[in-house]
Image (cartoon, coloured by chain):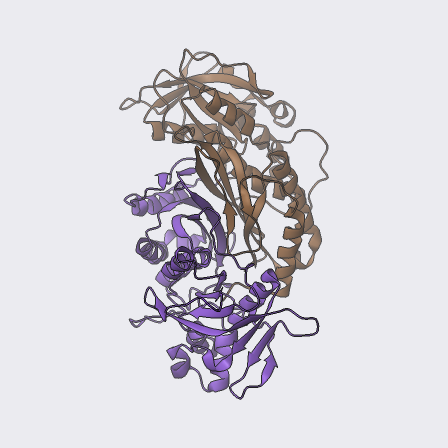
Chain colours: A brown, B purple
Amino acid sequence: MAVPRISGELALIDRIRRRTEAQPSRALRLGIGDDCAILRVPRGQELVVTTDFSLEGRHFRRDWHTPQSIGHRTLARGLSDLAAMGATPLAAFLSLALPKSAATDTRFLDGFLEGLLTLAKLHNVPLAGGDTSESPSDAVLADIVLLGGTPTGQALRRSTGRPGDLLYVTGALGGAAAELQPLLATPPSEPRPLSPGPSPHYFPQPRLAVGQALLRRRLATAAMDLSDGLSTDLTHLCEASNVAAEIDETALPLHPLTQTLLPDATARLHAALHGGEDYELLFTARPGTKLPRSIAGVPITCIGRITDKLPRRPLLTLISTSGKSIPLKPQGWEHLR
Amino acid sequence: MAVPRISGELALIDRIRRRTEAQPSRALRLGIGDDCAILRVPRGQELVVTTDFSLEGRHFRRDWHTPQSIGHRTLARGLSDLAAMGATPLAAFLSLALPKSAATDTRFLDGFLEGLLTLAKLHNVPLAGGDTSESPSDAVLADIVLLGGTPTGQALRRSTGRPGDLLYVTGALGGAAAELQPLLATPPSEPRPLSPGPSPHYFPQPRLAVGQALLRRRLATAAMDLSDGLSTDLTHLCEASNVAAEIDETALPLHPLTQTLLPDATARLHAALHGGEDYELLFTARPGTKLPRSIAGVPITCIGRITDKLPRRPLLTLISTSGKSIPLKPQGWEHLR
């Protein structure tokens, strides 16, 4: 066993290290190269920490996603969790296991790092360490760790929603699910070249600036990110807060891609309610709180309200366009199964 | 894609959560259940962070190791990195992917958690979060993240050894490699029941108390842990510190198991020099520093000295029992290949 310090692995670490040495950061005192990295958490701040797997065949496929997209998505998953807490990123750590074929072919690694580090630079987060190994199978395995800071005692949580609060989302819903649809319908044999423009599935944008503004301006009573689909994530928020919720169908901000890529209104509604990986924020605010129409350029939409949790009443209710109350079950997608 | 919140996975998270809810910790403000965990780093301390993969087929085998041993070893890898910095553990995060077979058979998970949490309790480190997934192959995949604290500016490093320093190790060397020998010679079809008693391979003991004492009493000039084998790890220390080193063969503290499990003196020396996973500490101290014979019950042995790095001179030299200088190459083991 032993940490497998094969020459190939040392080369891998060196390759990562070379690309990360020039990262400026006040928090990071010592990066890649020792037994641990050393960080200084800013005075008056608490530390928030999240880890997220990105496993080939579960979270991405090399025949569907470019290395750049895989690297971007790996980091975005963690950054979105920080956004949900209203945190400012301090550092990322990457554990990466490559199968022999991908370890000797540096194109994958270089593209992966390019995707990951481009997003990291955008949000000013240094890659401070991690681990490398040869994968025990043909699957690329990544685990990303994100550390962030929030003013002590002020991190946004999912457990603090209250009956009477209004329910909001950032951006638009269903875009990632809509982009996934053609992949599921006609699985490609290799990743498509990406057309320029926003791509919620291939290059999701974590809502860090919105989360930080919600915290700083004390606008939200509770928050979480939309990674598993609105119906599933809102269920988690309701369970954690011990409340119920109503969603207004007419208020749902459908992503433009649901119009162009999905066949009908039923499919579009399904994508918005149950499509995962939008990486938008879901949050609650007191009814008297005045929310701006957008924060940091991202639209904010009121989509419903928090209600009392009552016995024999569904946790989630959808108010349809015709005004009918329909019980809503969590139906988050699991795309790659 | 989407985080696969299958009922089985939620059950897995619940199972972990139930076993971790009663963990007392001053640092941990919010544990498993939100988008991130929240921690408070003690005033006057810096944060040290390490991540380590434990991948089936690379770092362990379910037909060689019991679930308890796998869980223990997973955490020990990370704790040993904290020990090397002289840090006090604050929290652990576990990313765990199980193949379907192991996910439905709770015996593996329960044994794994028992091994991990027993060691965690011993060192007072709460399991504060992580991620779960189904493994894309038949391999169990784990990634452990450890956060620790050290007084600001005082973490032990591997880059600060100086010529003239004496070279020390904790405990004994080669024990893990000796225990691995019978496994490699006659691979078992299932894990052996473990006899009671210390077992450096199956249940390595990270040297946290020693590392903390070295830092607190300012005894060491540089330190790292022995995970890859003395020859490999000392090479890393020399490269990081820009120095060379000599090891006295007669001074090497051989583990008693090398006597009982290995055939001859050559094999024993090989295990001590190149056998990985001893998880002892390797450190340097000024020649005038008086080191106790043991710290926290762990023997401390001077095994050589740091010298100037000179062109055309080997980085590592072994002074044999007959007084001969032999160049020493890094030869860390990679057991499971």
Instruction: Report how many numbered discs are placed on residues in the image.
Output: 0
Q: Residue at x 39, y 67 (%)?
A: B202
Up-down relation of residue B68 to residue B134 (above or below): below
Q: Is residue A63 visible?
A: no
Q: Is residue A21 visible?
A: yes
- Picture coordinates of residue B103 (x, y %)? 40, 52
Residue placed furthest toward the front: B288
In depth, the one of B115 and B250 nearer the eye is: B250
**Residue A243: quadrant of the picture:** top left
Q: Is residue B214 left or right of residue A72?
A: left
Residue placed furthest toward the bottom: B322
Up-down relation of residue A310 to residue A94 (above or below): above
Q: Is residue A99 left or right of residue A313?
A: right
- Picture coordinates of residue A89 (x, y %)? 53, 36
**Residue B45: quadrant of the picture:** top left
Q: Is residue A250 left or right of residue B212?
A: right
Up-down relation of residue A166 to residue A57 (above or below): above
Q: Quadrant of the N terminus of chain B?
A: top right
Q: Quadrant of the C terminus of chain B?
A: bottom right
In depth, the one of B289 and B101 nearer the eye is: B289
In depth, the one of A277 and B212 nearer the eye is: B212
Q: Residue at x 44, y 39 (%)?
A: B5
- Picture coordinates of residue B267 (x, y %)? 49, 82
- Picture coordinates of residue A299 (x, y %)? 57, 19
In depth, the one of B79 and B18 nearer the eye is: B79
